[in-house]
Image (cartoon, helix red, strand yellow):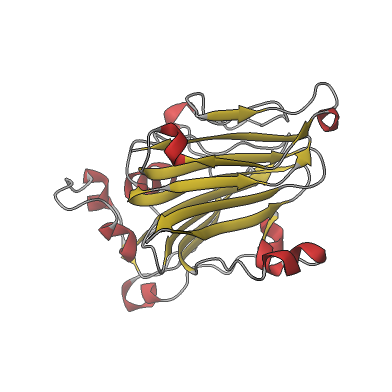
Amino acid sequence: MVRMLSGRALLAVLVVLPTVAAWNAAPASAAGGPSSAVYDDEPVDRDTELARLGYRNGVRVVFSRDELSGDWGLRQDGEMGRNAPLEYDDKQSMLQTYLTITPRSVPVPRELLSEPPAGTPTPPELAHRTIAASPVVADDLAVPTSGGMATAAVKTCWDLYWNTYNWLELPGYPNPGTVWHPTKTYYSSDFGGMKMYSYSYLANCGGYARHRIYYKSAGDYYKHHDYEVAYAHWQAVKKGSVHRYRKVHYDGAAGDTRNGKYTG
């Protein structure tokens, strides 16, 4: 159920959701054990959450923007055998995606209005939407059916997310853990050079999976996504805004599914 406020009260957060732990993914900087020490010397760029959305099938969605790079982000988290990432046209803007996957009753984050490039026509759907300060938080949303998304759609360990992709690594069958995937980095330079967006899907059917995404600036790579994906869960991420060299990195693991691409 979306709790809406009107008038000046829209400047407040709309709904208080459960803690981050309930989202089934934790930033690596917050993870316990030896791995946290390894990544302390490789900080993650801070980002500002623009919207946090919860759907009735258990999918959690976060729209964000990096403070340093200015790149926009769209992260989806879910559970194997229970749900699947929401379907949307990856060629459309983040703003249009937001309008596609949320009902009219959910306000639009004001900052997200500046995401489409200058000169982009204003989506007509905005005429029916309320604009609010970030973060917009809404829960108990119905799963959108546009774009072929079915309310009963679920992911198995052997499903990919993007049918058009630059890379795909699948786990073993019928036991996912029988196939080991070594540490792997996919560079945008191997797929045409600078790209506007990184897309990465990681499903954990083996017990451990870490998800890292980088962009290059002034000759160095900077990390703007680093999450541990819980066992029997998946995560789908889109990051970008302008042409940059980019890379996606996966640690060595057994039983994971890796699927991704660069576009633009």
Does the rendering let one see residue 89? yes
Give the position of the N terminus as an image quadrant.
bottom right
- Residue 15 in picture, x, y percent from top left: 53, 67
- Residue 146 in picture, x, y percent from top left: 43, 32
- Left-right relation of 57 to 256: left
Q: Quadrant of residue 147?
A: top left
- Left-right relation of 12 to 175: left
For image coordinates 31% across by 74% down, the residue present is 7
Give the position of the C terminus as an image quadrant.
top left
Q: Please, which residue is most extreme toward the top here?
A: 173
Q: Please, which residue is most extreme toward the front here?
A: 219
Does 54 sit above or below residue 233? below
For image coordinates 74% across by 43% down, the residue present is 252
Does 23 sit above or below residue 255? below
Residue 98 or residue 223, whichever sits in front:
223
For image coordinates 52% across by 38% down, the residue present is 86
- Residue 141 in picture, x, y percent from top left: 53, 49
- Residue 9 in picture, x, y percent from top left: 38, 77
Does the rendering let one see residue 59? no
